[in-house]
Amino acid sequence: MDNTGQNNITINVKSVLIVSLLSLLYLASSYFLIGYNTSELVLVLIFNSLFYISPITRKFILAFSIFIVYWIIFDYMKAFPNYHYTPVHIADLYNFEKHLFGIYDHGKLLTPNEYLRIHSTTFVDVVTGLFYLCWIPVPLGFATFLFFKNKRQFLYFSLTFVLVNVLGFVVYYTFPAAPPWYIQYYGFHFTPLTMGNTAGLARFDAYFHAGIFKSIYTKGSNVFAAMPSLHSSYPVIVLYYGLKNRYKVASIFFAIVMVGIWFTAVYASHHYVLDVIAGIITAIIGISLFNLLINRVKWLQVSINKYEQVIL
């Protein structure tokens, strides 16, 4: 018997009340935790619009609620800065990076970030900026493709994505770490409430006379969350599911973007090589852990089955 659609959420008094209450709760929580921001209202408007427009848009936004939950958790980190709980690693991480990956330039030992900053070129600035702009659109674009192509794989991909982020957040609070650009601007002295910085990506903005990266990094949740580099984790997840589903041409593209993002993270002074390696390891652990859970935990399998029926 085909059960497709039996568990789909329809528009009725109950669903309207739930969506309305959740929307108001989110806006109220955001106001008291991190202050009002127009992006919060935009998120609520987008969710409500897609929920009410049609059955397909309703399924779409319910499916992508997994990513919305991730975004809300990430955004709320502003209310609980990790440096309130654990000392920030600044000099020790910088010195360890130099010890492992240091490059001699005119007799002086530099970190890869420092070396690449000195030897930057406009061409590389533009190419790396384009790669870094892919760090969210590529995962979300692939997720959208999977939503219409294979909803089970969409759920696996989405849940893996969130799990890897949760693992990363745990490290953020147990090992707060300053990015390379912080030392370039502030030295080894800890300065709380430091705002995000475009660092080397400012050269991309300057070349195009735009504030693309500036607008992104001024909204950052926590400057002292460089380890692991989740920018480096995301393309690993995308490539894994691209290969798993045998999308050969797409996987080649994903691999190129992945390496490009890894290089840009270091080139633009947003992450150390150590951060990138930690991001790769975090992705591998998250993927492996999810595969283990999905095969061993019965209630997770049941929950995914039910959720799949809702968005079919």
Image (cartoon, rainbow, N blue to C red):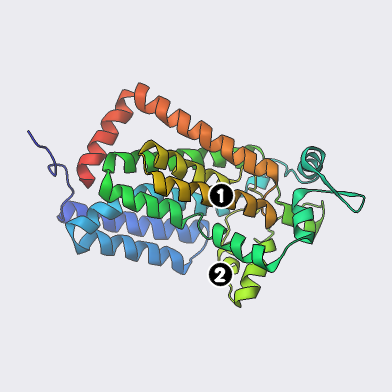
Kind of residue at disc 1: His
Task: Indicate which disc, 1 or 2, sits on the residue closer to the N terminus.
Answer: 2
Image quadrant in which the C terminus is located: top left
**Residue position marked by numbered label 2 in the rendering:** 212
- Give me the disc on residue 231: 1
User: Which of 85 and 296 lies nearest the eye of the viewer?
Assistant: 296
Q: Residue at x 45, y 66 (%)?
A: 39
Residue at x 28%, y 39% (from the top left corner): 152
Across and down, in percent, residue 245 comes to 35, 39
> In which quarter of the view is residue 60 placed?
bottom left
Q: Quadrant of residue 181?
A: bottom right
Question: In front: 285, or 33?
Answer: 285
Residue 269, image x, y percentages: 70, 55
Q: Where residue 220 sits: x, y (%)?
A: 58, 58
Residue 170 shows in this picture: no
- Residue at the right extreme of this rendering: 107
- In the image, residue 132 sits, relative to residue 147, either above or below, namely below
Check the picture and name the quadrant holding the N terminus: top left
Looking at the rendered structure, the kind of residue marked 2 is: Ile
- For this view, does 53 lie left or right of residue 205? left
Vertical comparison of 218 with 221: above or below: below
In this rendered view, identify the residue nearer to me: 201 or 173.
201
Quick check: 147 above or below 288?
below
Measured as percent of width and height from the top left, residue 202 is found at 66, 68
Q: Residue furthest left?
A: 1
- Judge the density around disc 1: few (<14), some (14-19), many (≥20) Cα neighbours within 10 Å: many
* Residue at x 60%, y 75% (from the top left corner): 208
